[in-house]
Amino acid sequence: MAALSTFVPLSLQTILLLIASNVFMTFAWYGHLRSLATAPWYVAAFVSWGIALAEYLLQVPANRIGFQRAGYSVGQLKIMQEVITLGVFLPFSVYFLKVPLKLDYLWAALCMVGAVYFIFRNG
C-alpha cells in the first residue's frame, strides 16, 4: 500500500479498495447462485468464505485508510460502501445472473443519492 499512496490520493485509494472489495463480496454472496447452483449448500458456503477472505483483505485497509488517513467518518464510509454496492451489484445481476434491468434500480439509486447528501453535507 505504501507505493500506491505516493501516486494515488488517500480518498481515491479508499474508493478503489472499496470497489475491489465489493466485487469480491458480490461474488461471494451471489455468485454461487449461478456458478454452484447444483452443488450442495455447504460447498457454496466454503467457496464463498474463500472469496470473502479476499473481500476482507481489501475492505479492512480501505476503511482504515479512509477513516484514519483520508478523514472520512464511519458514516461516510458506510454510505460510500452502500453506493458502491449498488453500483457493483446492478451490472453483476444483469450480466452475470441474467436478472432483467428494472426501473426500481433507478429509484434505489436516487434514494442513495439522498443518503450521500445527508451524510456528507456537514463534512
Image (spheres, rainbow, N blue to C red):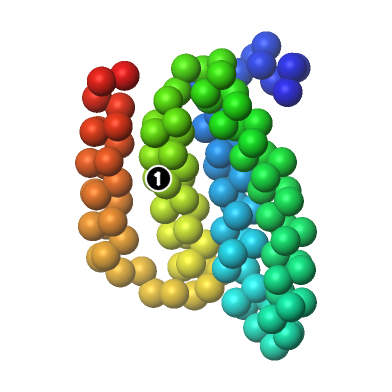
Residue drawn at point x = 71 percent, y = 74 percent: 44
Badge 1 marks a residue whose secondary structure is helix
Residue drawn at point x = 43 percent, y = 59 percent: 90
Residue drawn at point x = 48 percent, y = 67 percent: 93
> Is residue 34 shown above or below 12?
below
Residue drawn at point x = 30 percent, y = 27 percent: 120
Q: Is residue 110 left or right of residue 85?
A: left
Residue under numbered circle 1: 83
Q: Is residue 121 left or right of residue 4?
A: left
Image coordinates for residue 95, horizontal then vertical, percent: 51, 67
Question: Does the rendering let one see residue 64?
Answer: yes
Image coordinates for residue 68, horizontal then vertical, percent: 56, 19
On the rendered image, what quadrant is the C terminus found in? top left
On the rendered image, what quadrant is the N terminus found in? top right
Observer-nearest residue: 47 or 68? 68
Image coordinates for residue 92, horizontal then vertical, percent: 52, 62
